[in-house]
Image (spheres, helix red, strand yellow):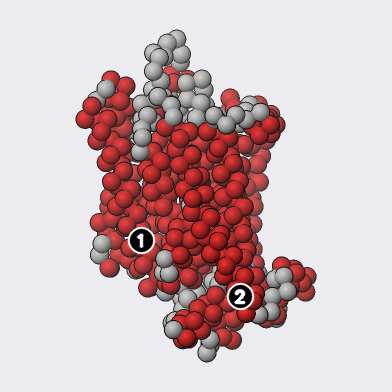
Amino acid sequence: MLNNMDYKENYDKVVSDLLRPIYITRSFKRWFAFLVVGLAISIFAYSLQIKLGLGITGLRDVTTWGMYISNFVFFVATSLVGMLITAVLGLLGIKWAAPLTRIAEIIALAFAAVAGLVIIIDMGRPDRLLNVFIYGRFQSPILWDLTVVITYTVISALLLYLPLIPDLKICAERLEKGHPLQRKVYQILSLGWSDHPEQVKIIQRGIRILSILIIPIALAIHTVTSWLFAVTMRPGWDSTIFGPYFVTGAFVSGTSAVILAMYFFRRDYHLKAYITDFHFDKMAKLLVLVSLVYLYFNINEFLVPGYKLKRADAIHLFALFSGHYAWMFWGTQIFGLILPIILLVFKFFRKPSYLFVIALFVFAGAWLKRYLIVVPTMEHPFLPVQHLPPSFVVYTPTLLEITITMGTIFLALIIITVLSKFLPIIPIWEMVHSGEQNKKE
């Protein structure tokens, strides 16, 4: 295991270890082929939706938002982890998080970019998307949402690229088995980096500015997403806590996503010396912290309307607690939130293998939670539903709809896979530089 103090003395070994995953392997080709085939099937399903319309989905006049919007909220939520790990922990001087910043930023960029595409998938006429910007009104939360999603994606890309510049120079010089064209691209993207003190100063200043900027933008992106629901009068959405409720939920799903990625990168890229048990232990504690805050908002979400028990709220709560969605609701709350908090209090369950399983349940529960936020409320409008068949009232996603939704997950994984394969997943220069700084201090 190497610590920050050892990186300078073991510079050649560090570079060799962290550049090794960049080389293409057979296992990478098989994994990438699987993702591409899955995405191709999803694109075919979406072409049928374009041709035949949204009638091929389970969406109807009563339930106009379903799996697509649930998926959109989930993707936006998970993307906030870049702000949490890179900006918040970085500005607080939390040094143990340094090896994980690039993993978090890659996840943030992938999920934020795909979130915008999910909105297009949900549109019956995607060719009219431009009208949102041409004729959009400031009063519309949808315009706000698109604006902050695009802004957050751009800043996430910059926050990924800026600390990467020194590493790109290292790749250009030290990637011995790399293709000449690949090394040439690294050289161009490194922008003439020479490790000059003035360049270091500019990089550090730029990272700090972006880290400060991304915090309010990240908070805005999911707060505005929550307003898409909260500004309505529908029971289940008519709440003043949806802003912080969505943001804390985003930290839960994002943290679990980083833990899952850490596990795979550590195992498949042989990075046990750099992504250590210590990092898993710290991330587990962070997951407990954000989950406790999220649990508090969950209690608020149901306790207050449950105490008042207005007729519309009662119908909604009974559907969750003991009705059609009870199995999903209690499964999400117990296995996706309460049980992980209890287990992670014990150090035994904060080991990588156990933490991976727990994070997987949390991650899946986070997606199902968004589904529960969207669908049950859509099925209980204010006006009585008359003269409609049950299929128009009770929402059930179709096979094509599920296939298209899976395609967005495949696309996000493709982005993460490509970026993590062609870029050093652990910041090389930053690790060495931080080791030198620690010595000086």
Pinpoint residue 251: horizontal percent, then vertical percent: 41, 52
Q: How many marks?
A: 2
Quadrant showing the N terminus: bottom left
Label 2 secondary element: helix
Q: Is residue 358 visible?
A: no
Q: Which residue is mark 2?
A: 200
Q: Nearer the viewer, mark 1 or mark 2?
A: 2
How far apart, in angstroms, are the residues tagged by discs 1 and 2?
Answer: 30 Å
Q: Is residue 162 above or below residue 34?
A: below
Quarter in which the C terminus is drawn? bottom left
Q: Residue at x 49, y 45 (%)?
A: 220
Q: Earlier in the sequence, mark 1 or mark 2?
A: 2
Camera-nearest residue between 199 and 373: 199
| Residue at screen point 41% across, 43% down | 246
Callout 1: 10 Å neighbours few (<14), some, many (20+)?
A: some
Quickly name the residue at label 1: 286
Q: Is residue 181 left or right of residue 86?
A: right
Pick whichever, 369 or 304, lies toward us.
304
Whether 11 is drawn above or below 51: the answer is: below
Q: Name the side, left or right, on which 71 lies relative to 126.
A: left
Q: Of residues 256 and 187, which is closer to you in this image?
A: 187
Q: Residue at x 46, y 66 (%)?
A: 90
Percent of width and height locating residue 38: 60, 48
